[in-house]
Image: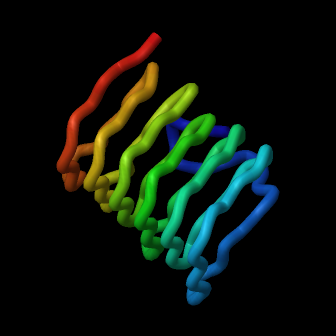
Amino acid sequence: MKKENGKIDSIDTILGQGIIFKGELKGDGNIKIDGQLSGLIEATGDVYIGKKAGVIGDCHVGSIIIGGKVKGNVVALKRVEILPDGELHGDILAPRICIADGVIFEGNCKISK
């Protein structure tokens, strides 16, 4: 995953714009979400939440880039990045956290080793 510019090198699964998904999304690969998801995300890979995407539920991921809205707690093994238009309403637990200027963030951050 390229973390500095908010882009992922390769994507294995896409939840497209206009798609509404309710349930648990689990997988090992990289995931891009451009639609709406209500439920738990468990991914050992990297997750990208697009600018128009919305997620309601906890995220347990390798890394995550948030460009849209997330309402839920985020636990990442590697990194959490929130882009300038991103919103996170929940707590963060990760070894690396990057929050851009202009982000809406309501929650607590804990940097883990």
Query: According to the image, what is the colour scheme of the structure?
Result: rainbow
Q: Residue furthest front?
A: 23
In the rendered view, tell whether residue 36 sits above or below residue 45: below
Residue at (70, 38) in percent of width and height: 44
Residue at (24, 52) in percent of width and height: 103
In the rendered view, tell whether residue 4 sits above or below residue 42: above
Quadrant the N terminus occupies: top right
The front one of 39 and 5 is 39
Q: Where is residue 5 drawn, in percent x and y?
A: 52, 44
Q: Is residue 14 left or right of residue 75?
A: right
Q: Where is residue 7 drawn, in percent x and y?
A: 60, 50
Q: Is residue 95 left or right of residue 109?
A: right
Residue at (71, 54) in percent of width and height: 26
Q: Where is residue 18 drawn, in percent x and y?
A: 57, 89
Q: Is residue 75 left or right of residue 69?
A: right
Q: Residue furthest bottom?
A: 18
The front one of 56 and 7 is 56
In the rendered view, tell whether residue 85 sits above or below residue 77: below
Task: Give the total number of marks visible in the rendering.
Answer: 0
Q: Residue furthest top?
A: 113
Residue at (47, 72) in percent of width and height: 53
Residue 20's quadrant in the figure? bottom right
